[in-house]
Image (cartoon, helix red, strand yellow):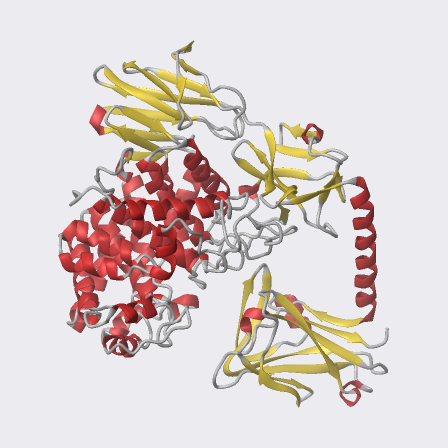
Amino acid sequence: MSQIKPYYSESPQVKAKPFSPHDVWLLPSPFHTLLEVNGRYLLSLEPDRLVSLFRKTAGLPQKAEPYGGWEIMGIAGHSLGHLLSALAWHYAVTASSPHLDRCSLLVDMLAECQRARSDGYFGAIPDADRVWAEIRKGELNTKGFDLNGIWVPWYTLHKMFAGLIDVHLLTGNKLALETAVKLADWAVDLTKDLNPDQWQTMLACEHGGMNESLLDLHRLTGKQAHLDLAHKFDHKNILDPLRRGEDPLAGVHSNTQVPKIIGLAKEYERSGKSSEKAASLTFWDRIARVRTYANGGNSNFEYLGPAGKLRDALSASTTETCNTYNMLKLSRHIFSWEPSAEVGDYIEKALFNHILSSQDGTEGGFTYFTPLVSRALRPFSKPFDDFWCCVGTGMENPSRVVENIYFATQDELIVNLFLPSRLEWKAKEAVLNLSCDILKSPEVTLTLAHAEKKEFALAIRKPGWMNGDLSVKVNGAPVASELGKDGFVRVKRTWISGDKVTWGVPSTLRFEGMPDDPRRVAIFNGPFLLAAESAGLDYDPCFVSEGLDFLGSFAAQAESGKWVAKGISKPKDLEFRPFYTFTQDTYSTYFDVLTPAQWLTKEAEIKAQAAKDAALASATTDLLRVGEMQPERDHNFQAMYSQTGAHQGRNWRHANVNSWFQFDMKVDPRAEHQVIFTFWSGDKGRDFKLLVNEETLVDEVMAGPTEPGFFDRAIDLPKELTEGREKITIRFVASSRTVSPGLYGCRVVRKGV
């Protein structure tokens, strides 16, 4: 099928144009492996289950049960929008007919739901008709992540718009565009009577990139109503300060903001408004330069902190995948306006270290957060049970890598990323093959093939991590080249078929310190972040050195591809390998460099904590590892409608509404006891009862600390509940209003030990 319009804007503001996804092919590499795994996963999702709630909302009979997780919550349907984009992108970069056919089938199924309703709307969001009716009347109420009691409805619709537009632009499917236009016309009519103040009230609720998608629709349809609606999604609380060059980002939810800025970038490309360009550049600067971690991601517990303050913002909830997906989209726009090696370096860091590590590489599990706290374990989604937001963006990521490899001006080809790939440059009637494996060899080779002599400049990014000059050879002979102020080395000549261009990008070990603490460091080998194998370590690993001049103590192991820190790390010589390879293993990423005097103090603290832990273990009569099959069996676990899952690398279990779960715990019949429960602060506000041996000890709405994180709650057990017994039965009961708080662990200890 032919495209209706080019995928990327042909605006005069775009100086370096990305290539159509149809023209770039990934060759064997870890990214290509991810692409293949993801391609299989996309086709494993069942269409009837995906559209089940769409059909229900449309009054049509459901043909299958919907998927679980987020797909039966207030954000239901968002995954299908992402899936449409992912299928269309996969088809574009692989020419896979099954993925094209699945696109067409899903569009047909959604169009059927739209026709059944007759008003132009379709969706899977529960209770949405009530909310849309209230919005139409101007009755608006939001706490930031809900609108009139529904979880981010405009955000969810944005995914549907984006998916349909991608299918149209990448596969030529006209019905996809018609369906998106009818949905946009419904939205225009729904909101036509809202005044500016009501709009700003509504936009306090996360709304994704609605401005972005409506600008795309306007480019395709030319309808003024679509452009006007796009501008109404201008959230002034965030965008106006950015237009003034200010930083309003401390304390805000990260991924809520990035799509708004992508919309500004598209508005700049449409209109040339300098204010929209300035705001986009300010935002990129405030994220990429001062709020980005070593893996290229940003945010802690989904939120942004003060500029340049990352040292104490390490947890199991750093670097949400959605943020990096969106920052890569924004970076592609900014790079195309004025290519720079600095923006290219950011793109490379984010792709090689965050995106490449965000899928499990086997069956289609995705990360929500990528933990950067020491001794972390990367949690992945269950392929058919979770459907987080980052599952949606994760489905798109393996294909979208191609949009940042090559760019072109009228007489220049820009090589931004060193990734094995093939480019079909139709304007020059040329095919170029790039081969490299910079983890194993510094050499990059670009081979050209075309029918006639072609004159153009080849611009090669000189990475910021590279020492020395980037020297270029053509057919084995050195050629004159020039390093521009933008960080690109240029070779201009008349090229002939068969020309082979080679250059070296030798990797060396280097530190990258925290912006607010240069002695809290991450370690890189060229573009690749390294992490230390940390399974079984009793405390967070560190280095001991007066200065930061000890990289010479790292020994390379050629056969394994690892580096070993010899004699400078605690608690042992650490083994390092590329961060993206840690899909199932415990790892550490950041390391404090302590002076010998600081280490003596730290060592004393470690010993004191070890003694405390040993005392707790000595007092413990029983410990339950929640959500694990054998430990729960060993504790006689029973339940009526209970669910389990994982969060921040730890398993949880809760009772569903009007349900319960229970388990037995060992006690000392001669001692007094406490029971210690581990909860997550984000579950505050959930109702629950706690019974021990059928006696109610707690009946409340759960409270907890204001700071996000796990916390322990100790409850004294009345002596009569344990005296003369060797076990007790603990039961959690949920109310008719909420599920119970997630239980992450349970420990019974003897008092006074």
Is residue 63 shown to the viewer in this render? no
Q: Residue at x 30, y 52 (%)?
A: 263
Viewer-proximal residue among 744 and 195: 195
Give percent across and percent down for residue 485: 40, 26
Q: Residue at x 75, y 52 (%)?
A: 538
The N terminus sits in image quarter:
top left
Residue lying furthest front: 244
The C terminus sits in image quarter:
bottom right
Give percent across and percent down for residue 99: 29, 49
Q: Is residue 397 left or right of residue 686?
A: left
**Occupied quadrant, residue 139:** bottom left
Give percent across and percent down for residue 234: 30, 59
Q: Residue at x 52, y 26 (%)?
A: 466
Give percent across and percent down for residue 725: 79, 84
Q: Is residue 143 left or right of residue 516?
A: left
**Occupied quadrant, residue 428:** top left
**Occupied quadrant, residue 457:** top left
Q: Residue at x 55, y 57 (%)?
A: 317
Q: Is residue 556 above or below residue 736?
A: above
Q: Is residue 481 above or below residue 715?
A: above
